[in-house]
Amino acid sequence: MTESRANILNKIKQALVHKVPVPFSDTPANPLHFPASAKELELEFAENFTGLKGRFSYCFNRAELVNQLLVLIETRQWKNIYCREDAIKEMLAKNGFTFTYTEDLAHCDVALTGCESLVARTGSMLLSSAQQSGRTVSVYAPVHICIAHPEQLVYDVQDAIVKLREQYGSSFPSMVSLATGPSRTADIEKTLVVGVHGPKEVFCFLIDE
């Protein structure tokens, strides 16, 4: 063992024995880092979501949602539609959406999911493993469509986590993630590229009933 490695391991052992006090102990438990916006949550979310290349659509009711979906599917010529969430499939079927869903996520054209919350301040969709869609649907599909409702809108991420805790209690989901527009990376020569390691397009349909 080299001397430098031995020194590092020794420091780690000492740190484990002698606990370092947590800094900023006087910080409030739930600080509000971002003051609430004066805008309506729907507008705040739509502006931030579209600013990150997400595609937002407002629907007055479920029938309009189905009409918009049908137009989008015909325009894009999508054939393989994936959806694992029974409530969404039932709601769409009752309003005239008669497509047969594919069971093959790896080769689908588009995936439909719900969400836990919509975060207005960041334009994000909060998803969890407790949903029927699980961990993979919103990540593996080339196009992700999220269907949401106004009561799912919250201002900040902190509010979304509080909402989750109230809903699930001791059965808190093992995975919680934020989807904020299409996937993107700037790892290659610091150039922003969209749709590299996730969906190339993300839609959010908000149904106001």
Image (cartoon, rainbow, N blue to C red):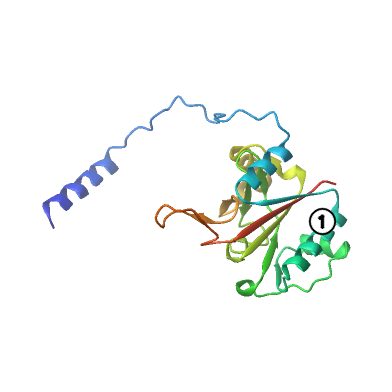
Residue closer to the observer: 145 or 191: 191
Q: In this view, does 121 lie above or below 134?
A: above
Q: Quadrant of residue 104?
A: bottom right
Query: Of residues 10 and 137, which is closer to you in this image?
Result: 137
Residue at 69%, 28% (x, y): give it: 38
Percent x, y of residue 67: 84, 60
- In the drawing, does residue 196 fall left or right of residue 154? left
x 67%, y 41%: residue: 47
Q: Using the rendered view, name the quadrant where residue 35 is placed.
A: top right
Q: What residue do we see at 59% from left, 64% from top?
A: 136
Disc 1 residue type? Leu
Give residue 5's position: percent from left, percent from top: 17, 52
49 relative to 3 in the view: left or right: right
Neighbour tally class for label 1: few under 14, some 14-19, many 20 plus, Cα within 10 Å: many
User: Looking at this view, is 48 or 101 the one in front?
Assistant: 48
Which residue is labeled 1 in the image? Answer: 65
Is disc 1 placed on a helix, strand or loop? helix
Residue at the spot x=69%, y=55% of the render?
A: 203
Q: Nearer the viewer, residue 89 or 16?
A: 89
